[in-house]
Image: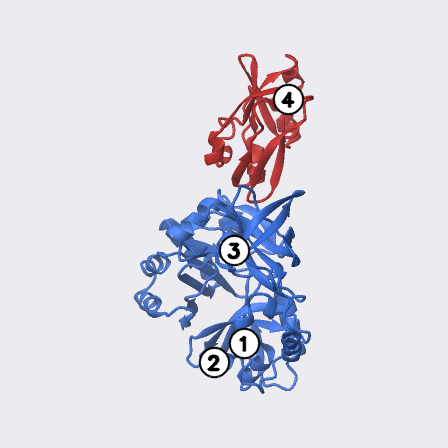
Chain colours: A red, B blue
Amino acid sequence: MSTTPAELRFAESHEWAKQEGDLIVVGISDHAQEALGDVVFVELPEIGKVFAAAGDQAGVVESVKAASDIYSPVAGEVVAVNDSLTGEPEALNNTPYESWIFKVKPANTDDLGKLLDAAGYKALIGE
Amino acid sequence: MGQRTPLFDLHLALGAKLVDFGGWDMPLHYGSQVEEHHQVRRDCGIFDVSHMHVLDISGSQAQPWLQRLLANDVGRLQQIGRALYSAMLDTRGGIVDDMIVYLTETGYRLVVNAATGAKDLAWMNANLAGYDVRVEHRSELAMLAIQGPNARQKIGELVTQERTALIHTLRPFEGQQDGDWFIARTGYTGEDGLEIILPASEACSFFNDMVGAGISPIGLGARDTLRLEAGMNLYGQEIDEHASPLTSNMAWTVAWAPEDRQFIGRAALEAERAQGLVSKLVGLVLEERGVLRAHQVVRVAEVGEGEITSGSFSPTLSKSIALARVPMATADRAEVEIRGKWYPVRVVQPAFVRHGKALI
């Protein structure tokens, strides 16, 4: 059983997203970190990278088990990345909802609304 | 649903995430395999390894039979309690299984792998004819491993005085019976520690007592990264029936002398040796970020190609390591293909950490 905070939105590929001012902040869900196992490396997107569409490849999370691509839940441009994950990748396991990975200036203001809400995500992961 | 050890419910109660291992439902970890790995290297931890099989060999011809069956020579075991590591080969020199063999009061005790138990018994029974030997599968016994620099000390504080005394006199690679417990100073982590074979009916409460005394339970995830750092083979990855001990970092376990000891597979190994060995098992270290994984291709400039047999992240070294079978002429550099790109790796001896210290 994982946790799914009610105020977040979720992509089907297990990223969470939330509004912060005019930016969208992105991380991975508790369900995702549990499935991955211990994270050992995070390949962050470059600042300035442009996602032409929601679902574009954003980076890689590598765990002891496997390497998993992460995708941007929204179209837009990367304006910030969480460099602390380079030295402390296990933060994604320990505090998945407090450990953001990147922040996007969205191309469209209503892309966030197209994502699953918490109830929808819980249904997706069967909880 | 796979096979379950007597401690299955206990693992669940301790929060284990389960995984299938060779047909057994085993704990992968109890929260973090990286933390569990560190716990063993720095202090100690306890593993349920009851999925492995204990085979007791008795009879007047136990020694000559095992001298035929195994590539190492049990004749080297001169004192009760001494143990050795050996491959059991087929007639083509391929490895049927690898195991530890102890000389006991009643004959020999073999500890063989979980996934190969049935195959091993079938092979042994097929090769029993003409020998006064009995093979007894001790399925009523469980097995626990307590590994780490503080393992023997901590266990010694929690058992009877006789057992504490025994624990402190055990030499490395020695195992002795005490009542219905068998205590050995062996392991699969590159650390000091014990492996205890005991009645299944006592295993749960002993495991519980250990955990209650603050000894961390350790899952198979950490078991794999620990043995990989120690350069130890895993049957099914480094070795199988297609692998010869001579190309698996196990040549040292083959006892060629005495020359008239006709162990099964000897002729095949002699032919292989005469032709010249073409590959070897080496260690690989990835200096940059990323994780080496089994089956990734290894390319050696001007020499040829090989393949990773086991790869993972090494928590102790904080980088990725692997074991790989590569052409004999491989020197100290190679490249590995990871998700379509080639990364340089250092080629090293196939042992990376010993007693908590980096060797490479």
SS of the residue under disc 1? loop
Estimate the x, y position of residue B166 in percent, counting from the top left: 34, 69
**Circle on res. B76:** 2
Q: In this view, does B1 lie above or below A57?
A: below
Q: Which chain carries label 4?
A: A
Q: In which quarter of the image is residue B266?
A: bottom right
Whether tag 4 and tag 2 are in contact, CB under 8 A, the answer is no
**Which residue does the numbered mark 4 point to in the structure image?**
A50
Estimate the x, y position of residue A83 in percent, counting from the top left: 49, 29
Which marked residue is nearer to the observer: mark 1 or mark 4?
Answer: 4
Marks 3 and 4, how far apart at CA: 40 Å
* Residue plotted at (63% across, 12% down): A109
Within-10-Å neighbours for mark 1: few <14, some 14–19, many 20+: many
Sequence order check: which comes first, mark 3 or mark 1?
1
* Residue plotted at (31% across, 58% down): B157
Estimate the x, y position of residue B314 in percent, counting from the top left: 49, 49
**Which residue does the numbered mark 1 point to in the structure image?**
B72
Q: In which quarter of the image is residue A56?
A: top right
- Which amino acid is tagged 3? Leu
Within-10-Å neighbours for mark 2: few <14, some 14–19, many 20+: few
Which marked residue is nearer to the observer: mark 3 or mark 4?
Answer: 4
Within-10-Å neighbours for mark 4: few <14, some 14–19, many 20+: many
Q: Is residue B323 visible?
A: yes
**Which residue does the numbered mark 3 point to in the structure image?**
B228
Q: Mark 2 lies on which chain?
A: B
Whether tag 1 and tag 2 are in contact, CB under 8 A, the answer is yes
